[in-house]
């Protein structure tokens, strides 16, 4: 078998494996739902959680990528901090994490149900 044909088969297998991983794992509806729930809880908690940045300047989580002193403090412990907090401001974020722990996941992530009339409009 010539080298180019042999290489072609390997590249084909590589891209097929990549495609299969994206369909079965990375873009699986449960993975996307968990990802969205984690992001939602962090967005809801963002105004109420502050991390020390450069010169001990308080930074919100969303401001941390611009300040490496604060950025390296971001970690999974923030989820535990939200879950274990008694602060009423964090109650919405906490409720999303409680739903996630109970596996009460968001439904229809990445999908949309179209009415027949709307489907006709798109075609």
Image: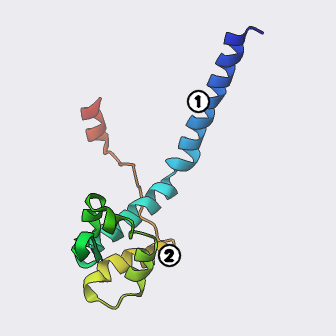
Comparing 33 with 8, the one in front is: 8
Name the residue rendered at 66%, 28% in the picture.
13
Q: Helix, strand, or loop for circle 1?
A: helix
Q: Residue furthest top?
A: 2
User: Relative to residue 115, is residue 86 depicted above or below?
Assistant: below
Comparing 69 with 16, the one in front is: 69
Name the residue rendered at 40%, 55% in the picture.
109
Q: Residues within 10 Å of mark 1 (few under 14, many from 20)?
A: few
User: Relative to residue 71, is residue 56 depicted above or below?
Assistant: below
Q: Position of residue 63 (x, y in %)?
A: 24, 64
Q: Which residue is mark 1?
A: 15
Residue 53 left/right relative to 110: left
Q: Residue furthest bottom?
A: 86
Viewport quadrant of the C terminus: top left
Residue 38 left/right relative to 67: right
Q: Position of residue 5 (x, y in %)?
A: 69, 12
Dot placed on the residue nearer the N-terminal end, 1 or 2: 1
Q: Residue furthest front?
A: 55
Give the foreground label among 1 and 2. 1
Q: Helix, strand, or loop for circle 2?
A: helix
Q: Position of residue 89 (x, y in %)?
A: 25, 84
User: Relative to residue 56, is residue 88 depicted above or below?
Assistant: below
How many numbered circles does the render carry?
Answer: 2
* Mark 1 to mark 2 CA distance (whole Å): 34 Å
Q: Which residue is mark 2?
A: 101
Q: Residues within 10 Å of mark 2 (few under 14, many from 20)?
A: few
Residue 119 figure quarter: top left
Q: Position of residue 24 (x, y in %)?
A: 58, 46
User: Relative to residue 114, is residue 29 depicted above or below?
Assistant: below
Residue 44 left/right relative to 107: left
Residue 80 figure quarter: bottom left
């Amino acid at each position: 078998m010539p080298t180019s044909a042999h290489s072609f088969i390997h590249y084909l297998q590589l891209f097929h494996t990549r495609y299969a991983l994206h369909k079965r794992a990375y873009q699986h509806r449960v993975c996307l739902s968990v990802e969205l729930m984690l992001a939602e809880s962090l967005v809801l908690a963002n105004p109420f959680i502050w991390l020390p940045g450069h010169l001990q300047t308080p930074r919100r989580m969303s401001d941390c990528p611009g300040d490496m002193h604060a950025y390296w403090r971001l970690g999974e412990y923030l989820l535990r901090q939200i879950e274990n907090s008694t602060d009423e401001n964090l109650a919405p974020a906490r409720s999303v994490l409680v739903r996630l722990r109970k596996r009460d996941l968001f439904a229809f992530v990445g999908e949309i149900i179209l009415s027949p009339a709307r489907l006709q409009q798109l075609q």
